[in-house]
Image (cartoon, helix red, strand yellow):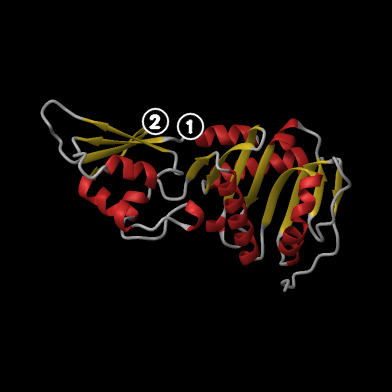
């Protein structure tokens, strides 16, 4: 699955939370829309002629109903649950039974700053784990150069790093990272950071974004191991094994300072 296809697959994972016969006095629907802003879930309301069931929400996806939730629990959720750092994901709470269908699976955003924050989160995961493989697409070598110290440091900590870009400038020195010159529309128009989790498979994560206009990106974040593995396999097959240029510098497993 290529990067564009993976983003489309994530977009198609949209879920819907329908609030049945819920009072409007506390604007629960609005609060839920804000709470799940980056989780690719659509909030709607419905009223039945009988007024039953009252104060009930149904969470569903294309393949059926995922959960039936009490309105009071949703009110507690939006007032007592902490959103994760940089607005991506959720902190652990006693509401795991409610959040398990939504918690840190996918999100969509056109907020460039949020994509920057999410990139740093994945890079930090790889740095902390100190093993595995990290794939990063910078669109162009000229943009890759700005990230050289970050990726050289990650490679120095024992992570295999593959960086991809269109060679509009000479290949930058990323230390032990491997730099791949790729002249395809896919690499030129996408921005991605993908980590296979290394020795900690629960850390497997991908941030994928496609440029849809000047300084405008549409992106998705996923912990779905199947999707992450499919896009990694695509990069390995199409670019790692058959890239025009690959450069690497000396590598060490000693952590940087």
Q: Which residue is mark 1?
A: 12
Name which quarter of the figure residue 53 lies in.
top left
Residue 24: give x, y in percent of width and height: 21, 39
Q: How many marks?
A: 2
Q: Which residue is mark 2?
A: 62
**Which quadrant holds the N terminus?**
top right
- The residue drawn where x is 48% and y is 32% is 12
Residue 191: give x, y in percent of width and height: 67, 42
Vertical arrangement, residue 158 with respect to residue 96, above or below: below
Vertical arrangement, residue 24 with respect to residue 200, above or below: above
Furthest-right residue in view? Answer: 170
The foreground one among 135 and 78 is 78
Determine if residue 241 is in view.
no
Tell whether label 1 touches label 2 (CB within 8 Å). Answer: yes
What is the secondary structure assignment of the residue under circle 1?
loop
Determine if residue 76 is in view.
yes
Residue 256: give x, y in percent of width and height: 73, 71
Residue 15: give x, y in percent of width and height: 39, 36
**Which quadrant holds the C terminus?**
bottom right
- Distance CA(mark 2)–CA(mark 1): 9 Å
What is the secondary structure assignment of the residue under circle 2?
loop
Camera-near label (2 vs 1) is 1
Name which quarter of the figure residue 111 lies in.
top right
- The residue drawn where x is 62% and y is 33% is 4
């Amino acid at each position: 699955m290529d990067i564009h296809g993976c983003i489309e697959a994530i977009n198609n994972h949209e879920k819907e939370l329908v609030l049945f016969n819920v009072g409007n006095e506390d604007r629960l629907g609005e609060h839920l829309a804000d709470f799940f802003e980056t989780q690719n879930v659509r909030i709607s309301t419905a009223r039945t002629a009988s007024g039953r069931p009252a104060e009930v929400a149904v969470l569903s996806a294309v393949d059926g109903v995922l959960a039936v939730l009490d309105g009071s629990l949703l009110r507690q959720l939006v007032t007592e649950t902490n959103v994760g750092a940089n607005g991506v994901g959720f902190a652990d709470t006693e509401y795991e039974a409610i959040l398990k269908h939504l918690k840190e699976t996918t999100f969509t955003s056109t907020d460039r700053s949020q994509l920057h924050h999410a990139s740093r989160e994945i890079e930090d995961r790889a740095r902390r784990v100190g093993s595995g493989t990290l794939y990063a697409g910078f669109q162009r070598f000229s943009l890759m150069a700005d990230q050289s110290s970050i990726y050289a440091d990650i490679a120095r900590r024992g992570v295999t790093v593959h960086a991809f870009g269109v060679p509009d400038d000479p290949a930058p020195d990323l230390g032990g990272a491997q730099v791949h010159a790729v002249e395809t529309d896919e690499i030129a128009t996408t921005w991605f950071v993908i980590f296979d989790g290394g020795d900690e498979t629960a850390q497997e994560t991908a941030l994928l974004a496609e440029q849809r206009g000047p300084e405008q990106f549409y992106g998705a974040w996923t912990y779905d191991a199947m999707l992450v593995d499919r896009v990694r396999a695509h990069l390995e097959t199409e670019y790692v094994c058959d890239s025009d240029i690959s450069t690497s510098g000396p590598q060490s497993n000693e952590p940087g300072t």
